Image (tube, rainbow, N blue to C red):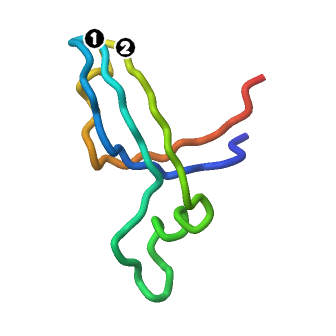
Amino acid sequence: MTIMRAKLQIASVTKHSAECEQLKFHGVAAKSYPADGSDEDNTFAKFSPSVSLDITIMNPALVGKFEPGQRFYVDFTPAE
């Protein structure tokens, strides 16, 4: 069961080698939102106003697959 879902955007991708890169994420935000608050990013930003996440990837199948600006949902599910 997922307890929390965050929506993150890739801020940067730093390639350390052909087999290793670091992804830096931040919480979604927009320069402006509709007055009625109907934008999904507005809802995520309201309830998770500050988010940062760094991931180093060394899986050859994933290196090179991510680009700055891409957005992802991150689900937090308890690990037993």
Please identify the quadrant where the N terminus is shown: top right
How far is disc 1 from disc 2 in space, using C-alphas? 6 Å
Residue 45: x %, y % from top left: 52, 64
Q: What's the amino acid at mark 2?
A: Met
Q: Is residue 69 above or below residue 42?
A: above
In the displayed structure, does residue 15 sit left or right of residue 48? Answer: left
Q: Residue at x 45, y 88 (%)?
A: 35
Q: Amino acid at mark 1?
A: Glu
Which residue carries the number 1 mark?
A: 19
- Residue 20 in the image: x percent, y percent? 31, 15
> N-terminal of the two: label 1 or label 2?
1
Q: Which residue is mark 2?
A: 58
Q: Give the side of residue 77 with respect to residue 51, left or right.
A: right
Q: Residues within 10 Å of mark 1 (few under 14, many from 20)?
A: some
Q: Nearer the viewer, residue 66 or 23?
A: 23
Question: x and y percent of residue 72 in the render?
Answer: 42, 46
State the SS at label 1. Answer: loop
CB atoms at circles 1 and 2 under 8 Å apart? yes
Residue 25 position by quadrant: top left
Rendering coords of residue 17 (x, y %): 23, 13
Q: Quadrant of the C terminus?
A: top right
| Element class at badge 2 | loop
Q: Residue at x 21, y 12 (%)?
A: 18
Residue shown at 37%/14% (left/top)? 59
